[in-house]
């Protein structure tokens, strides 16, 4: 299963010192189940979509933050939750016939 985050960008209402630039976008997710391990990616500014492979159905918290080259957060992070549900039914390929041969 994959968790896909579509990121929308907007002009910041906050002002920053001249020369400040976004170096990358830090994106992370963590599941709510005990023992969940955070997954993180650093993507280029203006990246529109980030995908995480998830193997457990769970409610995940995501955090997306613009960061400068010094590692400083720029503006407020965007935080939210998303539920990944397991499929109710799966299709399995089961043995249906055997053809013996001699070699």
Image (tube, rainbow, N blue to C red):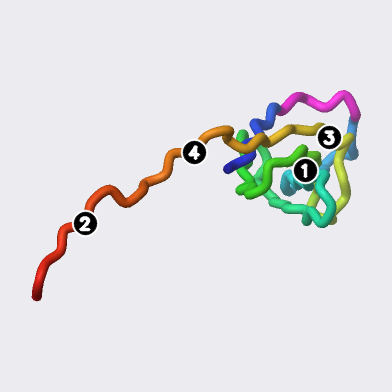
Disc number for residue 21: 1
Mark toward the start of the polypeptide (3 vs 1): 1
Calculate the distance from the C-alpha at mark 1 to the C-alpha at mark 2.
64 Å
Distance between the Cα atoms at labels 2 and 4?
A: 24 Å
Tag 1 near tag 4, CB within 8 Å: no
**Eye-nearest disc, 1 or 2:** 2
41 magenta-colored: no
In the image, residue 66 sits, relative to residue 11, either above or below, namely below
Residue 98 point in image, percent of width and height: 21, 56
Provide the residue span drawn in magenta. 9-14
User: Of all residues shown, which one is farthest toward the bottom?
Assistant: 103
Q: Name the spot of residue 72 as percent of width and height, x first.
A: 88, 50
Give the main secondary structure, helix, strand or loop, of the magenta stretch.
loop
Q: Which label is found at residue 29?
A: none
- Residue shown at 86%/40% (left/top)? 74
Lower position in the chain sequence, tag 1 or tag 4? 1
Q: Nearer the viewer, residue 98 or 85?
A: 98
Q: Which mark is residue 90?
A: 4
């Amino acid at each position: 299963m994959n968790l896909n985050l579509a990121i929308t960008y907007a002009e910041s209402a906050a002002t920053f010192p001249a020369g400040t630039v976004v170096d990358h976008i830090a994106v992370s997710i963590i599941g709510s189940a005990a023992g969940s391990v955070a997954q993180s990616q650093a993507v280029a500014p203006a990246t529109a979509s980030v995908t995480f492979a998830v193997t457990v159905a769970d409610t995940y918290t995501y955090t997306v933050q613009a960061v400068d080259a010094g590692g400083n957060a720029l503006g407020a992070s965007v935080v939210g939750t998303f539920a990944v549900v397991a499929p109710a039914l799966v299709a399995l390929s089961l043995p249906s016939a055997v053809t013996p041969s001699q070699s």
